[in-house]
Amino acid sequence: MINWKKEKLITVLLLSLLVFAGCSSDSASSEGTGGSGDGDSFTVMANLHSPEVPNDKILEIIEEETDKEIEIQWVPDNNYEDRLNTAFATNSLPEAVFLKNQASFIQFRDAIEDEQFWEVGQYLDEFENLAKLKDTVLDNTRINGNLYTLYQGRPLSSQGLIYRKDWAENLGLEVPTTTDEFMEMARAFTEDDPNQSGEDDTFGLTDRSDLVYGAFKTVASWFGTPNNWGEKDGKLMPEFMFDEYKETLDFFKEMYDNGYINQDFPVTSKTDQQEFFKNGTAGMYVGSMGDVVSLNNDAIAINPDVEFDVQNKIAGPDGEFGVWSIPGYGSLVMFPKSSVETEEELLNILDFFNQMMTPEIANYSYWGIEGEHYEVVDDRALPSDDKALTDREVKPYMAIGIGEPETNGRYESVFNYDAKEKAEELTKENEDYLIEDPTVPLYSKTYVDDGARLQEIITDATYNYIIGQMDEAGFDDAVENWKSQGGDAIIEEFNASE
Amino acid sequence: MKRSETWRKIKRNRLLYLMILPGLLYFLIYKYLPMYGLIISFQDYKPYMGIGGSEWVGFEHFNRLFASSEFWMIFKNTLVLFALQIFVFFPIPIIISLMLNEVRHSFFKRGVQTLIYIPHFMSWVVIVSISYVMLTLDGGIVNAIIESFGFQKINFLLNDDWFRPMYILQVIWREAGWGTIIFLAAITAVDPQLYEAARMDGANRFRQMWHITLPAIRNVIIVLLILKIGDVLELGFEHVYLLLNSSNRNVAEIFDTYVYVAGLQQGQFSYSTAVGFFKGAVGLVMVVFANWLAKRFNEEGIY
């Protein structure tokens, strides 16, 4: 009798424990698991830029070709940083971890210096394809001369203007080649009824809550603003201490005050920003010129008469043209020692990435299956018209590729769309006018610790100046505030490490 | 009480104790065990060194918090939103319950009830997005109406003045209906004879409400108020975070959003834990104080 009661108690206890164990193991597995051993089967954490996780079709081919078993943890782009930090804090990073961008690389610097990730520079020469990775880009990712990452190549600068060619023709406007003409186009697209509807239903530039990949930084580089940091009186200084930055502020303020730009741009999402452009409300878009394809696809579905064109060389008041550049990589992959436990395992994983850099597999991961997702035309790839199909089956896998066409031999692209062809050309042309970030190879401890927090002060001030909630004195105060809270130390440290 | 006696009591009511076990386990596992992690607020925590291996830094992170210019701003913002929750939001479900209680038409009453508690099931993302679409300067309907009456457009989203009204109105819209459920339940438990007696004494509907309904649900109100105060600093991180932008940060940045950005987006684990710790301490003081206050007024507290 008593025993039976005891048993009941134990059963309930066990049951409730099971329930909890179930909950916690669920959450643990979604956070990622540690290493599994041999490196022939491993997990990759990658950035998902599309709304949905792709199906396994391409992954299965890659697994078969490389003879590895791979699990991909897809993390949506907009909370990639949180997940990265959470996985890191709970020691549950998988074997191969892609970083989001340059900023997250800077954040991990301390951990890298503490030898938490494998140094891979020493093994590169053992792998035929990894050895091809460009030294110029690798140098941008070295820490104290060591290499801990493999990079995913990106064009140095694909920034430019996409605009409504048909509107410009309606109004007899030439393509802008200076910032003044850019302003004139924004004015005309706002005030001169470019869509000939007889209504006041259009504006010039559509922008979003992003000062870097939105319009601001690109326009700033047209004005000749340095890329994050620049030299002034023989000293490295942050961009916002330069007159050109202020000129850009005034330029945007003028557009804002006159209604040439969406009035809520500091809180506009990328989706909404593009929607204004696609549905014919706005006529100018500053960002990655390559986006013209997807913008066009959606826009002609709404209005078949839409015509887009791209433009890059827009000169500042001094007649010079410049455009900011990235350090040649979009993302980087690292290998935590907590999950990759042996050198053998690491070599196996590097072998996988080495194989990812063979033309055949690079094409699978970037273009998909020939005849199904793309055609080969003159030795280049022409993606299928069925954009929904490629988005669903191929596009996300671009996030696990490394290198670039020159090094991994994947097909360059060909497009049956003129504006896209032009965008590709202009992207190459941009390489002659690059404004580079001089601090990429430098190191500042304060910047690593507090840079992101301090940047917020400047970002807020920039928006508030443009929308008229802050005057020049207020902006200068914000800069002083930045300096006093650690900015001075960052300036010192960067200059000392030159 | 002697130990043996305690055990005897427990033994005698073991099934009852068994019933609280899951709840107890829940609190142990999810509320008490994680407190171990508060240790890292006194360390320079490095995840790969673990709590055992990280360096101790004493109160450095707390000093940094109290010294930072943002601290008072965040503290003030948190308290202001809390005050709005207590003084503006809290009475509303009670008022609605009293009003609904006066409605004799049960079909209408149930309809209204259902209608007002539906928003509780929408996520903040949806609610904030709807507000955004309505209030934006770029074709939002509210500004279109304001303009059609010949007034200037109002910049609702990008300024300090509108954040707080927007915040509390959204809270009311989402939670007021849900809040009525418990009060209505308490009201139905009031003995109808009391009302009859009051009517005999010539009390009108309003007097009945004032002298019978309200005193009858006073206990429920007080307990809920104390619980609410206990959540002093749980203002709904998600909601505020979604409304936060460059132009309203001076009034919208609260502890929760600050911890999230510093901790998870910028990887300052120790510092953000220290901020969270401080927040928890403030919350604890508030609950104890509220409970003490309730006892002073001879009401039942929560413990």
Image: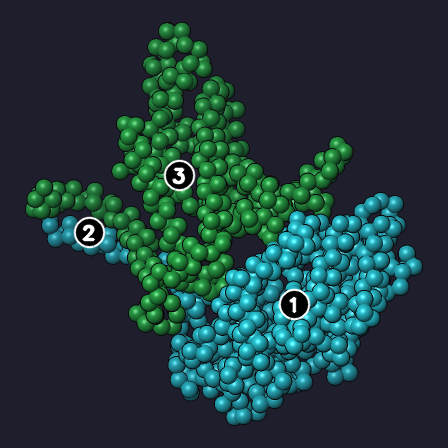
Chain colours: A cyan, B green
Instruction: Indicate the position of residue B187 as horizontal and vertical percent values.
Output: 38, 24
Q: Residues within 10 Å of mark 3 (few under 14, many from 20)?
A: some
Residue A80 seen by the camera: no
Above/below status of B168 relative to A240: above
Amino acid type of the residue that numbered disc 3 sits on in the rendered structure: Lys
Residue visible at 33% across and 28% down in the picture: B219
Residue visible at 9% across and 47% down in the picture: B3
Q: Which of marks 2 and 1 precedes in the sequence? A: 2
> Across the whole image, how many numbered discs are drawn on residues?
3
Q: Which mark is residue A8?
A: 2
Residue B70 is left or right of residue A170, and the answer is left
Residue identifier under label 1: A239
Of badges 1 and 2, nearer the viewer stands: 1
Residue sticking out furthest to the right: A172
Residue visible at 77% across and 54% down in the picture: A255
Chain letter of the residue carrying label 3: B
Residue A79 seen by the camera: yes
Amino acid type of the residue that numbered disc 1 sits on in the rendered structure: Glu
Instruction: Indicate the position of residue A426 as horizontal and vertical percent values.
Output: 78, 74
Residue identifier under label 3: B228
Question: In the rendered view of the protein, which quadrant contains the C terminus of chain A?
Answer: bottom right
Foreground residue among A40 and A331: A331
- Quarter of the view holding residue A429: bottom right
Q: Secondary structure at mark 2?
A: helix
Q: Secondary structure at mark 1?
A: helix
Foreground residue among A269 and B160: B160
